[in-house]
């Protein structure tokens, strides 16, 4: 009698292995989300994403992060106290851990938000675990690019550097509009479109276009709210 192994890398339904799924997020997302809609696996993708975020944060020197925070505070007319070596050592340990936990919580939150909007408010079919699988895999786009940007962040001294819309509009004056554009990360927009394709795969009545409109509206709303509080 044979032994059947069930896990992230083995599936009797033909779901690809975890590495294949993460690669498919880039080259064949439509096929991937169709498979995830039928068999929503999420644990492996979520953990890989959280670990890569942790690595990205851990690679950035604590001194650089503190200096960036100090500069941001000075721009708002505030001044942060100097941090001693002991505090910096604590920051080096705590910040990656907090980043790992924040990634887990934010993924779960966004999946719940999409499930609430699509399944509860708009009346689509779908379960929370399906949206969780979509978000966990789609987030790998932003996570992977974030890791690739880490050396550039260190070299130019900007740990918050992202590929955002504001980068391509440097002629705009500082203010709320530019701040909103800076929080519209291109890789996050890309990830959102993959989630929208997933919402279409979960319920065929929901077109990709309408799902993308909903998803991008959520991203824009978050950017507007964050920019509002930052610019105050």
Image: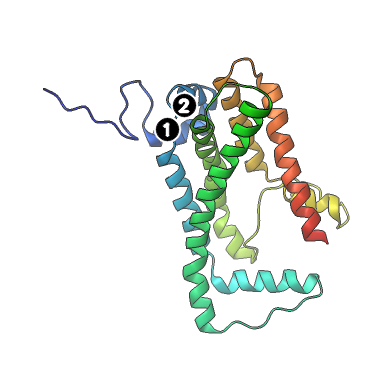
Q: Give the left or right position of residue 77, taking residue 185 as reference.
A: right
Point 58% across, 38% down: residue: 112
Which one is in front, 179 or 169? 179
Point 48% across, 46% down: residue: 49
Point 58% across, 74% down: residue: 63
Q: Are marks 2 and 1 in contact (CB under 8 Å)?
A: yes
Task: Identify the residue under disc 1.
Answer: 41
Residue 100, given in percent of the width and then of the height, sits at 49, 55
Q: Which of the image's four quarters has the C terminus?
A: bottom right
Task: Name the residue furthest top.
Answer: 205
Residue 216, given in percent of the width and then of the height, sits at 71, 35
Separation (CA) of disc 2 from disc 1:
7 Å
Which one is in front, 145 or 94? 94
Which one is in front, 214 or 179? 214
Task: Identify the residue under disc 2.
Answer: 36
Q: Which quadrant would residue 192 be assigned to in this image?
A: top right
Point 30% across, 30% down: residue: 10
Task: Name the residue furthest right.
Answer: 173
Q: Judging from the image, what secondary structure is the residue with disc 2 in?
A: helix
Q: Judging from the image, what secondary structure is the residue with disc 1 in?
A: loop
């Amino acid at each position: 009698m044979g032994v059947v192994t069930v896990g992230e890398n083995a599936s009797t339904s033909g779901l690809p292995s975890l590495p294949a799924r993460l690669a498919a997020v880039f080259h064949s997302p439509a096929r991937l989300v169709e498979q995830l809609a039928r068999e929503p696996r999420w644990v492996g993708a979520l953990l890989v994403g959280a670990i890569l975020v942790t690595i990205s944060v851990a690679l950035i020197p604590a001194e650089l992060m503190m200096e960036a925070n100090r500069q941001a505070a000075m721009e708002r007319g505030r001044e942060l106290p100097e941090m001693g070596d002991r505090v910096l050592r604590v920051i080096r340990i705590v910040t990656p851990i907090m980043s790992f936990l924040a990634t887990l919580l934010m993924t779960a939150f966004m999946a719940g938000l999409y499930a609430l909007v699509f399944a509860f408010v708009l009346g689509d079919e779908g379960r929370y675990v399906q949206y969780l699988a979509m978000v966990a895999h789609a987030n790998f786009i932003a996570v992977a690019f974030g890791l690739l940007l880490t050396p550039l962040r260190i070299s130019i001294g900007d740990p918050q550097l992202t590929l955002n819309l504001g980068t391509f509009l440097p002629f705009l004056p500082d203010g709320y509009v530019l701040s909103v554009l800076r929080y519209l990360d291109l890789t996050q927009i890309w990830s959102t479109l993959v989630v929208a394709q997933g919402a279409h795969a979960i319920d065929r009545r929901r077109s990709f276009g309408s799902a993308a409109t909903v998803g991008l509206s959520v991203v824009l709303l978050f950017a507007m709210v964050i920019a509002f509080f930052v610019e105050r």
